[in-house]
Amino acid sequence: MYFRPFPILTIIAIPALAALIALGVWQSQRAGWKADLIAEFAEAAKVTPLPPEEALCARTPEVGAVIAPPQANGPTLRVFGHDTAGAAGWRLFQTAQLTCGAVLTQTGFEALAIGGPGGVMPEGPKTPIDRFLVEAWPAKPMMAAENAPDRNEWHWFDAPLMATTLSTAPLNAAFILVPLSGTPDFLTRTPPESHIGYAVTWFGMAIAFALIYAVFHARAGRLRFGPAREGASKK
């Protein structure tokens, strides 16, 4: 084998190849980490859930914790969003009054009619919800529309204005409660399979990069396999 690398190209290629391999390894590790999180959540969801007061006020609340159904009542806020099946519509929120503040709790979903006004209303879920999930208070999306409290149409969670509209003080703006129906979105948004796909992509790019590097040197006469030819060492 004969190999005489281009110095500058090799200096650039080595860290680039190392970075591609490192990204592939990182995504492989994330796939295992995400699979473990999903398995842990599935086991935690089987345990008898704590009452909301105990889970949220008597201890430090944990995002992702599963709790018993809260007692939510009072006026309803319609917040634009999606259900677990991806259908667009209005998420309906009421407040659960706890000693640590009023907590917005999703109590229903109003799907948008297919085809606009007068269209067919998609059917909602039939299974009763007996567990709720603690989620972090949603941040305002970058391109969110303006809220319209007079029409009860909300496009992002504006804590001060929501508290005024609900005549509720204080409104706990640390987290919200949503019905638990299957594995939550923050675990399924990028499943382990996706991380495996990313890892394969990074490793594939690393292989392709190495092949291009080798072909480039081979075409320049700087890389040959097999017995060295006479005079090659003098080039």
Image: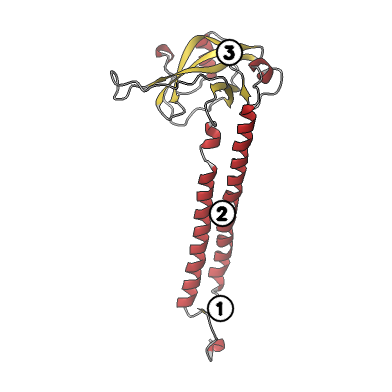
Marks 3, 1: nearer the viewer: 3
Q: Amino acid at mark 2?
A: Gly
Q: Which residue is found at the position 49% from the left and 54% from the top? A: 201
Q: Position of residue 61 (x, y in %)?
A: 66, 24
Who comes first in sequence, dot 2 or dot 1? 1
Of 226 and 233, the residue lying toward us:
226
Amino acid, disc 3: Ala
Sequence-wise, which precedes: disc 3 or disc 1?
Answer: 1
The residue pinned by badge 3 equals 96
Q: Residue 123, image x and y in percent?
A: 38, 22
Residue 148 at x, y percent in the picture: 42, 17
Helix, strand or loop for disc 1:
loop
Q: CA distance from mark 3 to mark 1?
A: 72 Å
Say if residue 89 shows up in the picture. yes
> Does any portion of residue 63 appear in the rendered image?
no
| Separation of marks 2 and 3 at Cα, in angstroms | 45 Å
Q: CA distance from mark 2 to mark 1?
A: 28 Å
> Which residue in the protein does label 1 denote?
4
Residue at image coords 55%, 65%: 13
Name which of mark 2 and mark 3 comes first in the sequence.
2
Q: Residue at x 46, y 31 (%)?
A: 142
Between residues 104 and 126, which one lies in front from this camera angle? 126
Horizontal and vertical percent position of residue 3? 56, 78
Instruction: Looking at the picture, tell me which residue is in the foreground, 67 or 223.
Output: 67
Q: Badge 3, how many Cα within 10 Å: few under 14, some, many 20+?
A: many
Quick check: 1 above or below 103?
Answer: below
> Mark 2 — residue?
24
Q: Secondary structure at mark 2?
A: helix
Q: Amino acid at mark 1?
A: Arg
Residue 223 drawn above or below residue 102: below
